[in-house]
Amino acid sequence: MSDLPDTENGDKGSYAAPALEKGLDILELLAEVGEPLSTREIAERLARSKSEIFRMVFVLQQRGYLAREAGTGRACRSTTRRPEQRRARPAYKTTWADRARGRCRPRG
């Protein structure tokens, strides 16, 4: 069952997440070419500005999805990212008793 609302003609609606799409475009490009690329090369291949690609690459590197090639600074997919590098903090904390009762409490 989909959570997407129906549109006027009965089709499922679509949602845009431009920042997510841009980040995934970068990761997919690097996977496709199989070699490190400079920020300029990524921007050219994706038809985006160098500044917006720089920001995305910077964040993807901080989160452990990308690494910089030593000497050239070219971006490549990270092979060492571990899930514990960055986890979202849950909006609710639970205690053992809460879990047993099926309840969560807002973080305080």
Image: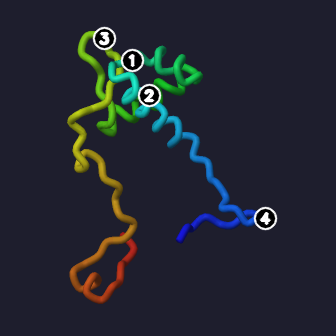
| Residue at image point 23% right, 86% down | 97
Which three-letter amino acid code belongs to the residue tagged 3? Thr
Give the spatial CA distance, label 4 vs label 2.
Answer: 35 Å
Q: Which residue is mark 3?
A: 72
- Earlier in the chain: of badge 3 and badge 1, it is 1
Mark 2 surroundings within 10 Å by alpha-carbon count, few (fewer than 14), some (14 through 19), many (20 or more): some
Mark 3 surroundings within 10 Å by alpha-carbon count, few (fewer than 14), some (14 through 19), many (20 or more): few
Q: Which residue is mark 1?
A: 37
Give the spatial CA distance, label 4 vs label 1.
Answer: 44 Å
Give the spatial CA distance, label 3 vs label 1.
Answer: 9 Å
Which three-letter amino acid code belongs to the residue tagged 4? Glu
Residue 13 in the image: x percent, y percent? 67, 58
CB of mark 3 within 8 Å of CB of mark 4? no
Q: Which residue is mark 2?
A: 29
State whether residue 64 is above or below residue 75. below
CB of mark 2 within 8 Å of CB of mark 1? yes
Mark 4 surroundings within 10 Å by alpha-carbon count, few (fewer than 14), some (14 through 19), many (20 or more): few
Which three-letter amino acid code belongs to the residue tagged 2? Leu
Give the spatial CA distance, label 3 vs label 4.
Answer: 52 Å
Q: Point out the image quarter for the C terminus.
A: bottom left
- Earlier in the chain: of badge 2 and badge 1, it is 2
Q: Which residue is mark 4?
A: 8
